[in-house]
Image (cartoon, rainbow, N blue to C red):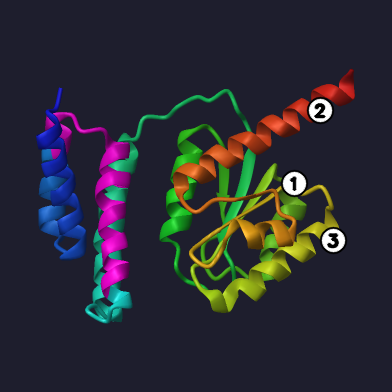
C-alpha cells in the first residue's frame, strides 16, 4: 500500500507534467503510478485534472497563451488515453442511456470527456456527439435513441444562449426529457431558471446527479405500476 507522502509525490508529478506539457515525464509518472499501485481514477482526478486547472489559471493570467493551452491539453489527453483503460468500473445497479455533447460554437471538450468516462465507468451507455454539436444533431439523436438523460456542456459564456436553445427545443419535443448541464459559466441558479433536471460543476457530481435522476425515474415508474 502506498504511503501518503509517496502518493502526493506521484500526483504532483502528474500535475507538473501536464502544466509543463511534458509527455515523456507524464508517461514516466504513469508507469511509476501503475507499478506502485496508485488508483487510476485518483491519478486522473487528483493528478491530471488539477494540472489542467492550473493551466487554465495560467491562461487567464496571460502567462500561457493558446499554443501552450493546446499543448497541455494534448498531454492531458495522452494521459487519459492510458489511464482510462485502468479505471475500475463500479456497478451501481443503475442502467441507463445518456447522450452527451458540447453545444455548437464551443470546442472545449475536456470536461465532457471526463463526465463521459465517469458515466461509462458506472455502467451507463453513453452516446458521445462530440464538440461543437449543432442543435439539429441533438434533436435527431434524441428522436432516434430516446435516452434517459441528455447532458449538455459548454465552457464559454458566449454559447450559453445556444445551450438554452437546445434545452428549449428538446423540451418542446419531449416535455419529460431529463437534461443535465455543466461547464464553467453554468450555475445552480441558471439550471433552475431553465428548468433542467440537474447541474453539475464537475465529473464526480455529474455521475452522482445522473444516478439520482435514474433512481427518481425508477421510483416514479414503480409508483405508476402500483
- Residue, x 64% and y 60% (percent of image)? 189
On the image, the x and y values in percent for residue 187 come to: 57, 60
- In this picture, residue 7 sits left or right of residue 80: left
**Residue count near mark 2 (Cα–Cα under 10 Å), binned few <14, some 14–19, many ≥20:** few
Give the distance between the C-alpha atoms of the residues marked 1 and 2, in whole angstroms: 16 Å
Image quadrant containing the C terminus? top right
Residue 137 occupies which quadrant of the picture? bottom right
Identify residue for label 3.
172
Residue 170 occupies which quadrant of the picture? bottom right
Looking at the rendered structure, the secondary structure element under dot 1 is: loop
- What's drawn in magenta, residue-wise? 33-58
Can you see residue 51?
yes
On the image, the x and y values in percent for residue 50 come to: 28, 54
Instruction: Say if the magenta span includes residue 131.
Output: no
Q: Main secondary structure of the magenta part?
A: helix
Give the distance between the C-alpha atoms of the residues marked 3 and 1, in whole angstroms: 14 Å
- In this picture, residue 82 sits left or right of residue 194: left
Which of labels 1 and 2 is toward the front? 2
- In this picture, residue 7 sits left or right of residue 111: left
10 is higher (above) or lower (below) than 156: above
The dot on residue 146 is 1
The dot on residue 221 is 2
The dot on residue 102 is none
On the image, the x and y values in percent for residue 109 come to: 45, 62
Q: Which comes sooner in the sequence, label 3 or label 1?
A: 1
- Residue, x 49% and y 47% (percent of image)? 116
- Residue, x 68% and y 61% (percent of image)? 138
Q: Nearer the viewer, residue 28 or 153?
A: 153
**Residue count near mark 3 (Cα–Cα under 10 Å), binned few <14, some 14–19, many ≥20:** few
Amino acid at each position: 500500500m502506498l504511503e501518503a507522502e509517496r502518493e502526493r509525490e506521484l500526483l504532483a508529478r502528474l500535475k507538473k507534467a501536464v502544466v509543463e506539457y511534458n509527455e515523456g515525464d507524464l508517461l514516466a509518472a504513469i508507469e511509476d503510478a501503475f507499478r506502485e499501485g496508485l488508483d487510476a481514477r485518483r491519478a486522473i482526478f487528483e493528478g491530471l485534472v488539477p494540472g489542467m486547472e492550473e493551466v487554465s489559471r495560467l491562461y487567464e493570467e496571460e502567462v500561457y497563451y493558446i499554443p501552450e493551452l493546446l499543448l497541455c491539453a494534448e498531454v492531458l489527453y495522452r494521459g487519459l488515453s492510458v489511464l482510462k483503460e485502468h479505471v475500475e468500473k463500479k456497478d451501481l445497479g443503475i442502467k441507463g442511456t445518456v447522450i452527451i455533447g458540447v453545444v455548437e460554437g464551443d470546442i472545449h471538450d475536456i470536461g465532457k470527456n471526463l463526465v463521459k468516462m465517469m458515466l461509462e465507468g458506472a455502467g451507463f451507455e453513453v452516446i458521445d456527439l462530440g464538440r461543437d454539436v449543432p442543435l439539429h444533431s441533438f434533436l435527431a439523436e434524441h428522436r432516434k435513441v430516446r435516452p434517459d438523460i441528455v447532458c449538455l456542456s459548454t465552457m464559454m459564456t458566449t454559447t450559453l444562449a445556444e445551450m438554452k436553445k437546445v434545452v428549449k427545443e428538446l423540451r418542446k419535443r419531449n416535455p419529460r426529457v431529463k437534461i443535465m448541464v455543466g461547464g464553467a459559466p453554468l450555475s445552480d441558479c441558471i439550471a433552475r431558471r431553465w428548468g433542467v433536471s440537474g447541474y453539475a460543476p464537475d465529473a464526480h457530481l455529474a455521475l452522482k446527479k445522473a444516478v439520482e435522476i435514474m433512481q427518481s425515474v425508477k421510483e416514479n415508474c414503480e409508483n405508476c405500476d402500483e
